[in-house]
Amino acid sequence: MAGFAEAVRGIADLRFAPLDSTNTPGMNTDYVGVKSFVVESASDTDEQMGDDQVLFTVVENRSLDITTSAAMANLAVVGVVTGAAPVTTGITGSQITTWESPASLPAQYVQITGQATARDTAGGALRLTVLKAALQNDPTWNLESGSWLEPEMSFKGVALDGSLYRIQSFETAGAIPADGSDVAGR
């Protein structure tokens, strides 16, 4: 018999929380219009050969390759993941929000939490939390005739306290907490 929150489809929410110098997550910022959150494991492997065969295989330095995309240009999220906050000037009706790309990205680490709706239970959810990640380069801004702007960002995830990420199955879905914590207490 299937458990709860095993059959999921799509992504319903994605949030970024900056990590402080003690790796404690701050407030979450919603990535409005999230389209994708892809997390892939990467590692260095080495083999020792002898007697014309592989004798040993070692897998080391595990990390995560992460990409996200959204249906909207969310400058608040870009500010969180780069450490360079956007600035809004002007008054209502003529405001301008400006984000400037820093010449070099600071070492700003974030916690990334995505949640998908379960399709196999009444109201369940699957939540994936990358514990520590850093933006690899600026978002991709593709302004193309006849196409929607869907900014994409790439991150590298590294271990935090011996773990790369956490997956939680919820029998009853709840919102991703605003303060960057989750039900596991981090």
Image: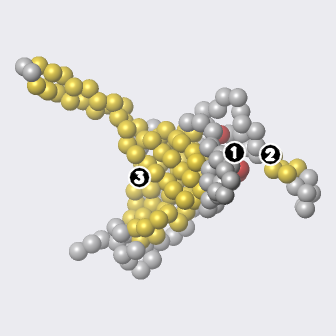
Q: Residue furthest front?
A: 145
Where in the figure is residue 173, as x and y percent of width and height? 47, 71
The dot on residue 49 is none
Name the residue rendered at 36%, 31% in the picture: 61
Q: Quadrant of residue 122?
A: bottom left
Name the residue rendered at 41%, 52% in the picture: 166
Find out whether the residues at labels 3 and 2 contact each other: C-beta distance under 8 Å: no
Q: Secondary structure at mark 3?
A: strand
Q: Is residue 103 rendered to the left or right of residue 24?
A: right
Where in the figure is residue 49, as x and y percent of width and height? 15, 21
Where in the figure is residue 178, as x and y percent of width and height? 61, 60
Q: Which residue is mark 2?
A: 98
Q: Is residue 87 visible?
A: yes
Mark found first going from the N terminus, 1 or 3: 1
The dot on residue 79 is 1
Where in the figure is residue 134, as x and y percent of width and height? 55, 38
Three-letter code, disc 3: Arg
Q: Which residue is mark 3?
A: 166
Mark 3 neighbour class, 10 Å CA radius: few under 14, some 14 to 19, many 20 or more: few
Mark 1 neighbour class, 10 Å CA radius: few under 14, some 14 to 19, many 20 or more: some
Residue 42 versus residue 72 in the image, above or below? above
Q: Secondary structure at mark 2?
A: strand
**CA distance for labels 1 and 2:** 10 Å
Q: Nearer the viewer, mark 1 or mark 2?
A: 2
Q: Is residue 21 visible?
A: no
Residue 135 versus residue 52 in the image, above or below? below
Mark found first going from the N terminus, 1 or 2: 1
Three-letter code, disc 1: Gly
**CA distance for labels 3 and 2:** 34 Å
Which one is nearer the viewer's eye here, 22 or 12?
12
